[in-house]
Every structure is written in structure tokens, then in C-alpha cells.
Amino acid sequence: MINHMGRLLFILLGLWVMGAWAAPPEKVLRLELSAAETGFDPVMTSDLNTASIEQQLFESLLTYDYLTRPVKLIPRLAAAMPIVTDQGKIWVFTLKQGVYFAPDPVFKGQKREVTAQDVVYTLMRFMDPKNRSPYKFLVEGKIIGLDELGEAARRTGHFNYDASIPGLEVLDRYTLKIRLKTTDYNFAHAMAQPMYGIVAREAIEGYAGDTASHPVGSGPYHLTRWTRSSLMVLERNPNFRHEIWNFDPGNDPDSQNIAAQMRGKSIPQIDRIEVQVIEEAQSAWLSFGKGELDMIGLAGQFAPMALHGTHLKSSLADRGIRLDRISDPSIAYYFINQQDPVLGGMSKEKIALRRAIFMVQNDEEMIRVIHKGQAVRNAYPIPEGVAGADPNYRSLLDYNPREANRLLDRMGYAKGPDGYRRQPDGQPLAVRYTSSLSSQDRELDEMMKKALDRLAIRFESEKLKFPEILKAERQCRVQIRLSAWIADYPDGDNFMQLWYGPHTHENNGSCYQDPEWDRLYEKTLTMPASPQRDAIYHQLARLLELKGVTKVSTTHIRNVLTHPWVIGYKAHPILPSVWSLLDIDVSRAPRQ
Amino acid sequence: MPIERSSPGLWTLAWRRLRRDRVGMTALLVVGCYLAVVMMALMGWIATDWTREVGVNYAPPVFWAQDQDETAQRSVIGNDTPDGPIALYGLQDPLAPVLAAIRAQYPQDRDLVEAPRRLSLPLGGDKWGHDVWIKVIKGSETSILVGLVSALLATLLGTLMGAVAGYFGRWVDDGFNWLYGVFTAIPYLLLVFAIAAVLQQKGVVTLILILGLTGWTGVFRLVRAEYLKHKTREYVLAAGAMGASNTRRMFIHILPNTSHVILVQLSLNVIGFIKSEVILSFLGFGVPVDVVSWGSMLNEAQNELILGKWWQLAAAGLAMAILVTAFSMLTDALRDALDPKLKN
Amino acid sequence: MNLTAFLFRRLWQMVPTLLGVVLLVFLLFNWVGGDPAYVLAGKMANPEDIANIRHQLGIDRPMWEQLLIFIRQIVTGDFGNSWATREPVSEIFRTRLGPSLVLLIPMLLLETLVAVVVALIVSAVRGSVLDRTLMVTSTVVMSISLLVYIIVGQYVFASLLGWFPVKGWSDNLWRNLTTYAVLPVLLGLMVSIAPSVRLYRTFILDEIGQDYVRTARAKGLSEPRILLVHVLRNAAIPIVTNVLMGLPVLLTGAFLLERFFAIPGIGREIILAVERSDFPIIKAATVYVAVATLFANLLGDLLYRALDPRVHFE
């Protein structure tokens, strides 16, 4: 009897063990986005949140190495790095074979391989005016014959995707030759953007009108559920090729640790990724604390909760939570509109006024009080981690209110009876600072008010919604603003072009048009990243300060916290997301 | 000749009834204290300069000061850039002569020393080191004034329109009713956004206009009903027969008889608008940066609570709760006193 | 006047109101609502791109033409696609309505239930210490800002004590009702119950003062019976009307709760649309909510007339 019972128990136990072995627990990664996504048609994407999802759904020809710093381009859909000839004008890409799009009804049950023709189609879509792509600037004016197709479509209302153009030549099923109009060493960076992920023509045409909610790509995940501006669920793409985690950790001990845990595993390891949109920072932080989120980008204002200086607080470190801290490839910079009737102009008085305004901006206080230490002073237009950066650059416009006041005194900006300065000709003087309605911007308003008080200049605030700020800026109607720019690709040109005269009404918000500056800048366009180019960049940066155009202020620090069960995470400065390269230690993860 | 008869009027009676209501009188006293503070702040007798940074960042309240963490250090503004000429990379500085002259005359300009700051403040400090106590007083001034003025505006608008609509009736009434229908049918949130966008400029006046222009509907409905009721009463008809003009009948004869309704609506609006100001601040339509209000304080304090800096949230929240409670009770007492039928 | 004629007249009266709403919103947002082209065009757009986008969105057309399009959209019920995400507007509202209702219906039901019960109790013991205490408490409770309740509530109950999830939403209605919606609903009730209690108390006291109560008392009916059967039945009319009219307001009014608890509801969507100058969504939201408000009012009137024999269709 006992024997029987024992045997039964043994069998049951065996069944249970086998069952558990047969179906390993699902690995789920739960994440947050701080702002709502838009839609998942890569050609129409403009924001980083959406790009972070698309990075997992679609694959571009190239990508960036996960562990190497400074970042390095590596092939993704391409079998190898492209062969570049004719001084960077001819680029030959060869695709990996046996790469398939995720299953989708548009393929009618067939497995659909990614071919060179798909790359041509993907690139063409950027110039289709109907798509109004925010990232078309990366190919616009570059590929021979492509702009003309776009121009024709603008006239006829129909883009001819069947046209064959000299710039995009399919050599065979997997090989594509791209011909550029001029030398462009940054073209490879364009091909590494998630927006340039390859799409299938059947899917785009099959879902015409609603491509944003039907992403069909070849990436490691596909979108299985989407509750707009709330929840996105990604699950592994069953058609994803066999790929092995194999990145070179170099000498960095953290990276070596990651490589030791991840090397040899197949990609992806995580079965399911749930991304929630959480707008209020308090909610996200509390969620992470409770283990409802596996990873969180630490909002600046909560840094004192989590960090002691640059280290994780022991209360969190004791729970096994890890901190990954990198400097964002971004700058925050003040600019003054050079065409403004009050602040603009190149007379000495105007230059002095602008420089004085820049000299009362207290970056240290901003870092300490507003960013809670999660930013660093950076005076150079190119941030760390981007080709051409210079951490040792010294600013002409460091905080110095006394000298700024003396400068204005000498230049004839006398104080009126109300205690505020007037223009040299006796006209009243006020500076209008433009910012958005967010609470973070309210803090920056306070900073600017304090700064102008130091100069005894009257402060005026212009509060606009973000689209309106952009509009005002592009129409050269903003007086002064603190703007920010984050690298699209890690090259200095992506930053220096912000002050190029012909980019006025585009993204040169300072509306600075200076033949001397433009001439120098144009020289750099055909130069690869090099000491020669850096020398010119230094002149460009200094000119911006001398003429009182801009003051580069700070660079943000990105702090990412991960729970101990998340394996293999290292913050990447350029890649919007690296989720397919991670793993979850199910034994440590909380039961879901 | 009419005999002078000292018959106590509506208001005298109401005041007598109110005086007997202990809760109402206490509430009146509290509201009175707040108003006195507002007056004193307005005259510049107290809380004159809330923008002065007297404490360290997040200076704790005096009674809480034992718990000082790393942020409570004396802040020093450092200018740690090394001295020596800065390379110009072969460029010319257009301001070189002026700057050289200044630097020759004042060689010490680069050394910046900040005035010492206090480590703790009566009710603590905010992130800049502003005194929260002074901010609360200044914030009371703004919030109460915004509440009062916008409630006056809304009541004025509502009364005027309600009076005209109710008195004249017919197509005039239809017109105003249409407007009322339109305003109540549009989602409040969108109405706020739209009006804020039209007014463009940010400031206290904008805030008052947003609240006033969206808040008149309740008053309108009640006043219109009162006028509908009163215009056919004998005393109004008699005044008409004696040649009183429409305006006279509307505002001299009927208005005093509806004033109790209006007064109660007014105080309800004050309460509602003081609370709305907080929400508007959350949406970014609050007071400008050089003005402080309860709404701006609560929104600032939003993230401070989990940092353990609870004092600003507590101070502003409490100041507001006390006033709103007192004002609500005063309104109740007022309603009871003015309309004794309601009270059982 | 019979019911059909009354209904017909009321529906007919909605037309000018709706037209007014449409005109007002159209003018306000077209005049100052912002130009989304500059955001949609991306970081490096040139003026031609922006012109192209403006053309595609149709905002370069004359005002009257845009208005006609808007009116046609209302008639057909098809508001096109969102400018920001290119998703059909109807789809957005279809998916947003559910979460909003899951939040609002329990809130409204609980609020009404609790408020009626408390109002009955305090009315029964009117003037007593209990009445005074409860009224004072309710005044105090409602005088604290919802923002404070949310910030403190989320911190204390969800994070420190861990009784509720901090935020979240699922597909499962039951799970939403029992897990995710609980804390937001409770916090919402903190500010919404007290005013209702006060209002319903006056409704009930109004009825208690009526002759029929005196008659009932004279007939020797017990006080609870009078309150529960006679008074409540009559006080129900204004109470139901009040609840109905509150529904459309709540639909958009819960945006604070939706934002802090990451609930994909309508209020949050409207804020997002305004921030992005997503005009199709703003237009649709206005029309939907306006229609809902008008119908709620109509329903309220109908109920009022159905429940109260003294009122006739005029």
C-alpha cells in the first residue's frame, strides 16, 4: 500500500518535473516610456520613444556595436560592412541570406525573404511626399535620381516605385549598389537608423492608410498588441534567423561581465516585452521601486532618491539593483535670434548685450538645483561620445555676472528710474524667453528670470505649446530659448549644422547667417572626422561665442536602473533600445 | 405720508441669524484672518520679497532639522575654470578692448562669493531656498485674489446675462440660453485650452479670465430662473406702471430680491476657482514665474514628497484646505441665514 | 403635448446648440490652435516640407472649406485620421472609452450609493451632533485638492503600504475593476462624495418639509419608513438627474487620475491631442462630448417627467 502510494507520488512528481522542464517559464521584460509613442511606420517616425520600439521590429542595413565605445558601426541586415569606393560616392551593400519578415496575413502564408529590392523600396519611400517623412534629410539630395522621383511625385501626385534610377541599382537578389551625388562619409550612419529599417512592399501597400498600426519587419520581435499611448506588447518573431550573442567586451570590466553571461546565447532570449506609457515621473519611479517595472530611465528630479553623487544608494544596491550611467550624446544650448530687432545685429553694443545675457546663465546652479546633479557642464557644441567632441574646450561665456554688468555699463545700457536697464538710445529693454507649458520648463523660466535679474534686465515669458515653439523658431520670432539637440548619428556634423546660415527657417533657430561662419562650415562637409576638421570646428564654436549667438550649457547624464534579474544591460548612447540583447534570470524575477 | 417704521430688512435679519450660528461665526473669523493677511501682503507690510533665497536648497523646517542629508550644505557658486587666456583659434574678439579695460580695472571679478544661507527655516525652504512660510503667505494672496476676482467676474457675467435673459424673455432669452447650452456642452478641459490659447499671454489676468469666462454658467441658470419668477410679481408690475424703466426694474427692483442667491453663488465660485487654480497650474496655465500661488506651490511640490521634502506640499495644501473649509462653512451659514426655509 | 412631440422638439433644439459648439471650437482652434506641421515635419524640415504637410492636412485651404469638411465629418461620423499617429479617430475613441467607463461607472455608482445613504442618515438626525460632525468632516475632506490626494495616496497606499499597484491597466475587465481601478476610484471619491452628500441632503430635507410627510407622520408611519419609502422616492428625481448630468463631465474630467495611474482613458487622450495640436481628435472629442451632454440632459428631463407626475410636457 505504502509502496503503491510512494510509486504514485514518484510518478506524479516525475510528471510535474517533466512538465516544468518542457515549458520553461516565459521571460517577460516590463518597461516604461515617459511619453506616448506615435505609430510604427518607420518612414513616418520622428521621436525616440517610437524609434525604441521600431529598433526591435525592423532591421536597418547597419547598426552599432553593443559594447564598443566610442560607438562603432557593424552590419545588421547587411552580411558585412559596405564596400565604399570613389571617395565615398559608391556604396555596395550585400544582404544576409535567409532573413525573413515576420509572419503576416499579407504574405498569404508564405515565408517572405528580405531582398535588395526591399531596400530600394524602403529608401524610395522616404522621398514620397505622401509619407512626409521627418527623417528624409538623411537621404535627401544624396542619391542620384531619387530626389527627381520625389519631385515628379509632387507634380503628378503619384510616386513611381517601379522606376529604376541610377542611384539605386540592384546587382542581384542580395546586392545593392548605391550611387551618391557627392562624397558623404556619414551615409553609413543614415543606414543604421531604426527609421531606415527595411519594410516589405506588400505589407505597406496591403495596409495602405494604416501602416502605422501594422508594422511588418524582420526584427527579433513583432508587435502583438498595441493599445495606443498606453501599452505595447512585443513577442518574439517566429521567423527570426538564428543569431548568436557575440560582442567584443574590450577592456571594460562591466562589459566583460556582460559578455561572460551572454556570449553564445541565441538572440533574443526574452519572450515577451511589455512597454507601458507612464507620463508622470512619480508613477514610474514608484512602479520600479515595487518591481512592477524591470528597468527605468531615472528622471532627473528623482536622482537624490537613488544616488549618492554618482553612486547608487546602498538601500537600492542592497536589493541588487544596478545603475548604468552614461553621458547622453546631447547638448542643451541657449541661442539668441540674430535677426531680432532688439537683440540681433552685429554692432558692438548688441554683441555685448548678448554675451552679457549668456554670462549670467548659471550652469552650475542649473545642474545642482534643477538637474539634481544629473548633467555636466559642456561648453562645446559637440558632446562626448560623438566624433569631434572636445571635453577640454574652455568657454568664453562662463558665469560671471559682475563682468557682464560692467560690460553693459560701458556699452551704455544705463539703468532707468525703475531700476531696469534701457537700450543705449534710451528705449526700454526687455528680453522675452520662450518655453513650453511643462513643469520642467517652469523651473527653467525661474532660472532665466534670476539670470536677467542679475543684469537688471526686464524678463518676459512667452509660453507656447511645443509645436508653436518650433513654428516661432523657424519663423525667426523667438528671442532667446534654451534648446536641446540629441545626436541622430554620432558625428559632429549633426550638431554643427545647427548654426549653418542656409538652415535658417529649418533648425538654425538662432537665424544666424554669417558668411565667414558658413564658408568655414562648408569646408568641413567633405572632410572625414579628423584633426583638420576638428581645428575648423573649434573656430566655428568660438565664433558662436564671440558673436554672442549661442552658449552651449550642459549635457545630460542618463541613469538607467535595472533590477537584478535583468541580465546583460549596458546603456548605449545611440541605439534607442537594446532589449533583444538582454536576458532575464527567471529564478530571481518576481512571479508575474 | 408713510410712517417711518423700523422693519428689519432681509440683511439685518440674516446677520442676526448668522450671529447665532457658532460654526458660521468661527468660519467668518478664519476667512477674515485670511483676508487680513491678503490685505497686509497686498499693502506690502508682510512677505514683501518671497524671491529672496534665504535658506539652503530644501532647507528643512526648524522642528525637523535634525534630519539633514547631503543636500543641506552651504551652497557655494564655484567658478572652477582655470585662469589664463582662452585660445581664440586665430579669431578676433570684437569686444577685446572693452573687456581688457574692465579686467584691468577689476581684476577680482571672477571670484564669486555668495551670501551665507540658513540651514533651516520656520516652515522649510523650496528647491531654491525660498522661505516656504513667506511663499505660503504670498501664495494665499494670489490664490485668494484670483479666486475672488474671477468669481466676481463670473458672477457679474452670469448675473447680467441671467437678468437680461430672464427679464426680457422671448428671443433674448433664446439667445442667451443658446450660449449657455454651447458653453455647458463643450468639455471643460477643451474650453480651458481654447480660451487659454486665445488669450495667448500668460499671467494672472489670463488665469482670472479663463476661470471667469468658463464659470458663469451656474450663476446664469439660477439668476435667470429668479428673474423669470420675479418679473411677473406685483411689485415689479407696479414699478412698471409707475414708469420705471426696464433697467431700473431689473437692477433697482428685482436685483436686491435675488441678491441672496447671487451671494451664495459668488462664494461657491470662490471655493471652486481656488481649487481649479491648482488644476490649471498642473496643465501649465497657472501663474507666471514671478508670482507664487497655492497651485504653483502644489505643482512644484509634486515630486518633492517622495524625495522626503514634504513641507511645501503640506504648507500649501494645509493653508488651502483651511481656507476652503472655512469658506464652505461660511457659505452654508450664509445660505441658512439668508434663506431660513432651507434650514429645518 | 405628448411624448413624441416633446422628444422631437428637444432633438430639434439640439441642432443650434451643436452648431454653436462646432463653430466656437472650430474658430478657436483654427485661429490659435497651433500648427502641427512643424512638429510632424521632424528635426530637419525645410519650408517646402512644411508646405507639403500643410497641404496634406488640408490646413492651407480656406477657412469656410475646412468648416464644411468638419460639418460633413460630423454628419458622416467619420473624423478621418489623427494627424500625429495617422490612426483613425473613431478607433482611438473606441479604445479609450472602455477604460474611462471602467473608472467612471464604479465611481459614479459608489458615489451615489454612499452619498444617498449618508445623506439619509444625516437628514434623519438633522441638527444633531452626528449631523454636524459629518457635515464638517465632509467639508474638510472636499477642501483638499485632488492633486494632493493623488500624490499622497499613490505614495502612501500603493508604494509604502503596497496595498494597490502603483499604476497599470490590463485587458481583463475584472482585473481592472478589482486591481487597477480601485485606488484611483477611491481617490476620486474623496473629492466627489462630499459635495454630493451636501447636495442630496438638501434634496431630502426639501422633501421632508413637504405636506405629505406630515400627513404620513400623522398616520403613524414609522420615521425610517417615511424616509426610505416616501421621501427617498421623491428625492430620487433630482438625485438621478444630477447623476446623469454629471456623466459627460466626468468623462473628460478624470484626466488627473488617468495620467498618474497610466490609464488609457479619454481625458488623457485629449490633453495629448492638445499638446500635439492634433485637430481631428480635438474636433471629434468636442462633438462626442457635446452630444453626450445634450443627450444626458434630455434623458434627465425625461426621467424627471416620468418620475414626477406633477410635471407635464410643455
Image: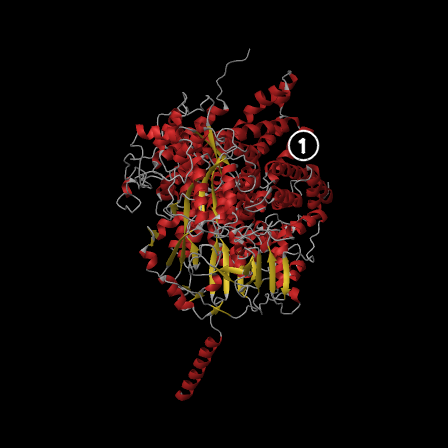
* Of residues C307 and C224, the one drawn nearer to the viewer in this rendering: C307
Q: Colour scheme in the image?
A: secondary structure
The N terminus of chain C - image quarter: top right
Is residue C82 something that shows in the picture? yes
**Residue wearing tag 1:** B174
* Of residues C16 and A227, the one drawn nearer to the viewer in this rendering: A227
Tell me which chain the residue with mark 1 is part of.
B
Is residue B37 something that shows in the picture? no
Instruction: Please tell me how crowded label 1 is: few (under 14), some (14-19), or many (20+) other residues with Cα within 10 Å.
Output: few
**Mark 1: which secondary structure?**
helix
Classify residue B9 as left or right of residue A156. left
Q: Position of residue A490 (x, y in %)?
A: 47, 52
Q: Position of residue C95 (x, y in %)?
A: 59, 54
The C terminus of chain C - image quarter: top right
Classify residue B240 as left or right of residue A506. right
Please identify the quarter of the rendering in which residue A218 is found: bottom right
Q: Is residue A380 above or below residue A79?
A: above
Q: Position of residue A73 (x, y in %)?
A: 49, 59
Residue type, numbered disc 1: Asp
* Of residues A453 and A542, the one drawn nearer to the viewer in this rendering: A542
